[in-house]
Image (cartoon, rainbow, N blue to C red):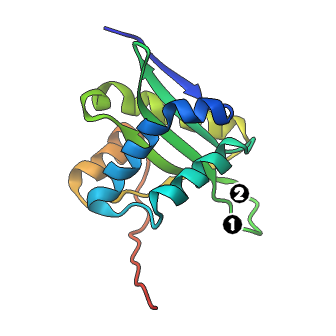
Amino acid sequence: MSEVTIKRVQGFEELTRVMPLILEGFEQMNKRYKAFDLTAEQYTKEMIRITSQYDECIGVCWVGGEAVGYGVVRDNTERFSDVRTALFYALYVKPKFSRKCSKPLFEAAEGFAREQGYTRVVAYNGRFSGSGFRLFEKVFGMRRQMTRFNKIIN
């Protein structure tokens, strides 16, 4: 079985190589649960912006030379807070590799956040189900704190 490797995307050229995977993840996360209020073009622009930040990153999971998943870490610190918070903005792994790669990808994102001085990580889950909760609580070691409700008013 091939080894799992997580590498940070550095620069536009590297980003273009993994963009098909990133857009696949965007499509899958938005297909059912509308994880992002963005078009694919807007999401692409956000990935370009994140790649240029020193304290935000896109990490890609590689298995046998194939990019099979990615995670995105963004700054989510409240404006006047002393607590630096990282948002795990996106986490996608191709279904065939999910058991093998989800936890290593999450751990790499957590390690990156720690290296950048973040003291807390948060994540949102579009799947309001037991399996989604189990993944974040049992596999990733996170705690559920609140449920978020939204309403579009215009």
Badge 1 marks a residue whose secondary structure is loop
Q: Position of residue 26 (x, y in %)?
A: 40, 50
* 100 with respect to 140 (left or right): left
At 72% from the left and 40% from the top, the residue drawn is: 116
Relative image position of residue 9 (x, y in whole percent) = 61, 32
Mark 2 belongs to which amino acid? Val
Outermost residue toward the top in this view: 1
Q: Residues within 10 Å of mark 2 (few under 14, many from 20)?
A: few
Q: Residue 69, can we see it?
A: yes
Identify the residue at horizontal 41%, vertical 72% (top origin).
148
Dot 1 or dot 2: first in sequence order is: 1
Seen at 59% across and 54% down, the residue is 46
Residue highlighted by disc 1: 78
In the foreground, 12 or 137? 12
Evaluate if marks 1 and 2 touch, with contact meaning CB atoms under 8 Å apart.
yes
Pointer 1: residues within 10 angstroms few (<14), some, or many (20+)? few
41 in relation to 57, above or below: below
Q: Is residue 121 visible?
A: no
Task: Give the camera-side residue of 118 and 42.
Answer: 42
Whether 43 is drawn above or below 7: the answer is: below
Q: Quadrant of residue 2?
A: top left
Residue 83 numbered mark, or none: 2
- The structure residue drawn at horizontal position 40% and vertical position 84%, both measured from the top left corner, is 151
Q: Position of residue 147 (x, y in %)?
A: 38, 69
Question: Is 24 placed left or right of 131 in the picture?
Answer: right
